[in-house]
Amino acid sequence: MSRLPSDGLIDREKIIRFSFDGKSYPAHPGDTLASALLANDVRLMGRSFKYHRPRGALTAGSEEPNALMEVGRGAHRVPNTRATVQEVFNGLEARSQNRWPSLRYDALSVNDLLAPFLGAGFYYKTFMWPKTFWEKLYEPIIRRAAGLGRLSGEADPAIYDRAFAHCDILVIGGGPAGLMAALTAGEAGARVILADEDFHLGGRLLSERDSVDDMRGADWAAEAAARLGGMPNVRIMRRTTVTGAYDTGTFGALERVADHISGPPDGCARQTFWRITARRAILAGGAIERPIAFPANDRPGIMMAGAVRSYLNRFGVAPAKQMAVFTNNDDGWRTAHDLVDAGVEVPALIDTRADVTVPQGPWRGIAGGTVIATRGRLGLNGITVRTPSGEARFRVGGLAVSGGWNPGVHLTCHLNGRPKWQSGIAAFVPAEGAVPGLSPTGAANGIFSTHGALVFGRSSADAALKTLGFSTSNITLPDAEDAPYRITPFWFVDAPGRAWLDFQNDVTVKDVKLAHQENFRSVEHMKRYTTLGMATDQGKTSNIGGLAILADLAGQTIAETGTTTFRPPYSPVQIGAFGARAEGKGFAPERFTASHAHAQELNATFVEAGLWHRAAWFAQGGETNWRESCDREVAMVRSTVGIADVSTLGKIDVQGPDAAAFLDHVYSNMISNLRPGRVRYGLMLREDGFVMDDGTAARLSETHFVITTTTAAAGQVMSHLEFCAQCLWPELDVALVSVTEQWGQFAIAGPLSRDLLSEMIAENISDTELPYMAHMPVTVAGIPGRLFRISFSGERAYELALPSGYGDALSRALVERAEAMGGGAYGMEALNVLRIEKGLLTHAELHGRTTADDLGLARMVSPRKDCIGKVMSQRPGLHGPERTQLVGLQPVDLAAELTAGAHLVNPGEPATRAHHQGYITSACYSPTLGHRIALGFAKNGRARLGEEIRAVDFMRQKGETLCRIVPIPFVDPEGGKLRG
Amino acid sequence: MRLTCPHCGERDAREFTYLGSAKLLDRPAGDTGAEAFHEYLHIRENPAGPNAELWQHVMGCSAWLHVVRDTRTHVVESVSLASGVAR
């Protein structure tokens, strides 16, 4: 056991059990998976991506490149979970990944022996030809060999949630700078959100032994957290990573709600993706320690020096019994002291700087020394050090490495800001004002002492408070260490052997040199050629080292070389969290009409029309095919009476003294001369002259209209009309409101429709009182409604509208009466057949590329006024015989098929694009005529009535049908049935 | 991105839909001919900088808004009701 006898933020009283690769281990609450494994002497935690090298935890935080595991079971399995972040809970199951048959004996570690051939660009150069081999042979093999964790292959059963929050000041990071900023802002009364990715607040205070105000740093942090917890204006969000900075103070954040317990309670989300809107933000996310590249620097046991202190001080774990320290800065020295204090033997403290005095201690201090070799197959057991006087070998199970600290500039670069090189700390710091309203502070801004973090945390908050108009608080500053940070940059050891930069993607110093040699010299090119920084850790520990080496090779400064682009998310986010509540019904909500339940009782099959679910047909006893139901319903409407719910059509209430003048602008035909009590068919054009939509306009009074739109275009037309009213003719006094959902509206169609309605309606609805294309207010069972005499079937027909709350009752009353008269409900399929028989249009014909002239409606563009689209509709090429025009089609052999989507070709000409004559938009079997009919567009079609033309269906490959071009409508061309 | 609707206050950009250039406010008179409409409908500047454009608060009050937005930074310089823009 490597657990130290005391110390740490773990609950030593409680023992919980977890498993790794099937073996059970004990742990304490407060452990991460990585700390618990190290406490159980498990150093080997994974295999690398490309060479299958044995790897252990390099870090103790979210920047971890190596210790990736599959966590959970079955469909709940989550791959690539960082063991350094995952909290241990009772029953946690973790497995290593990218190894076969086992972590200790991985067959593909043969790749490591082939490493001399597998450098950067190997795949590009080797698998060039034959081209067809790539998909079938090379890619599958490479994918199998290189890899991360496996997906479960099942749908993820976890719930993800989305949430929104607003605050005055968002503090990102709960270390000393973040806590001080939150305390300052909280005391001043600002609404504060403090988000921290860890499960304890405190940041580095949890991992260091320095005191704050005579307390241990962790205790001060706990006290600060308790103070913040008591402020009603402060919200603390633990386990919440701010993943991205977006425009206007918007931030994305992932809260891991239930990843630390053995399964969320029923209905509880596993993770929540937050959108936080902040008037000001303070970035106090700290810094990330970077490695030094030296030969074979990737063995389990080699760790970041700061991570070693985390394991010692926070988790009470000694990563090894003997550990050396290798550093280029003073901060690394602390690790040696902490190791010795924890009882770990430290044989050597190696500092790359020749000009420093290495502190005295129970170790051999080596100034100007470098590690040039390491040993140990599945974990470190020795190192070789080059000293100014020669070489020395040490037996160690661990090596703590520090190449310095990189401020976490990531969020400041998400709006394309570029960080600035600061030579004093040999690191990039955020550019000022890179994200408006976001101030980096503390270590994230290159201030590495605890004292500095507290000072600047307070001053950043004060500055934010001031701009927001709060009076600043006079909160006292606690005492804390203020050790200077001294560093001499040192990137890689010049010695034989592979020295890793990017542990997760297996990129070495040699690969960067090769990229440079092959002229991939821009940092962006080098990144893509070598894949440096392109793994799931996005190069948090490797990018700066890589570009420092590139700069060296190019003879440039690091500032001149620059960084690659930082993009959200800061750390990996599952797609499920990004898409929370936007899948399934969240993506496509369902809209039901008031008669939906009644339609279900009538055995309806539904079809989706946009978001609406509409009854398509009502199967009755013995009907096994939709066509049987549809044919029956069509015949029923043509002979008796049918009822259909048409509430989904868009309905817009237009009111105001200028309502009529307004409608003249938006309809191509004249509306202003319509008399109250009458209805007119109307056509709307787009400004480019093509047809947008059609519908009816009913005039209720001089200043009041109700217009309808097609179901599909309801939203678009509403938005368009608002545009016309507000943007084009704001001087017109007119108001618009969508009333689609306020009315339950039913078509009552068929020769017996008036008889049916007469029994229900108090008013006289004789043809004198209510002729075709008229409407009137009516009363049904004491309820005021509207009755329109309009028809979409060619039959005598009405549409009756009552407030939608009565829709269900109205549906039942109408269908019951219809059935008593030999009729009944009809659905969308029958409605479609009825309108094709009558040659009426839907969006199959109004598909955005047809003009009024194409549709034979040129006379509906009034010559007496201007309207939207009129000028452009008169452009050459938008009318005339060179265009395709709406026609009817029927097969010459009346038993033949006709399909929508088929193309029209002249007899004797090849079915190619050059000979294209048009296409079919709507087709159906007409039970009224006993054969198939279609609507379509044929070149110069109106002049070709009676001609034969071929319908060729390429998509369904049903062969072709010889058709005759016929006039529309197919049924009742004189309209006698309509008028009664 | 956030926009401040003159009616509803500051709201997330997802409550709004974007139409295009505010040039669409300057509809030519009906007797000016196809060339003027071609210019109105199809010819657009593509500025790297402040751009006047039209948004609608579709998930709010339905107001059409005249928005000046910097295309490089998404910084919104002004939002006003399109109906009140002087023409």
Image (cartoon, coloured by chain):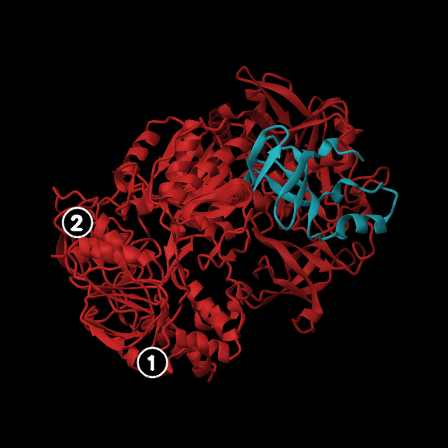
The 10 Å Cα crowd at callout 1, few under 14, some 14 to 19, many 20 or more, is few
Q: Residue at x 26, y 37 (%)?
A: A215
Q: Is residue A596 visible?
A: yes
Q: In this image, A891 relative to A728: left or right? A: left
Assign the C terminus of chain A to one quadrant of the image. top right
Picture quadrant of residue A618: top left
Quadrant of the image occupied by residue A860: top right
Q: Same chain for labels 2 and 1? Say yes or no.
A: yes
Left or right: residue A34 compared with residue A850: left
Label 2 belongs to which residue?
A91
Chain to which mark 2 belongs: A
User: Which residue is at the front of the view, A777 or A576?
Assistant: A576
User: Where in the figure is residue A962, as x and y percent of width and height?
Assistant: 64, 65
User: Would you say A349 lies left or right of A960 here?
Assistant: left
- Kindly identify the residue that appears in the image at 73 percent across and 36 percent down: A727
Q: Residue A397: x and y, percent?
A: 19, 66
Q: Amino acid at mark 2?
A: Gly
The color chain B is rendered in:
cyan
The quarter of the rendered structure image containing the N terminus of chain A is bottom left
Label 2 to label 1: alpha-carbon separation? 45 Å
In percent of width and height, residue A27 lies at 15, 50
Whether residue A37 appears in this view of the structure is: no
Residue to which mark 1 is pinned: A496
- Does dot 2 land on a helix, a strand or a loop? loop
Q: Which residue corresponds to the image point at 44% horizontal and 51% vertical from the top-left?
A: A446
Tag 1: amino acid: Pro
Residue pictured at 26% horizontal, 56% vertical: A335
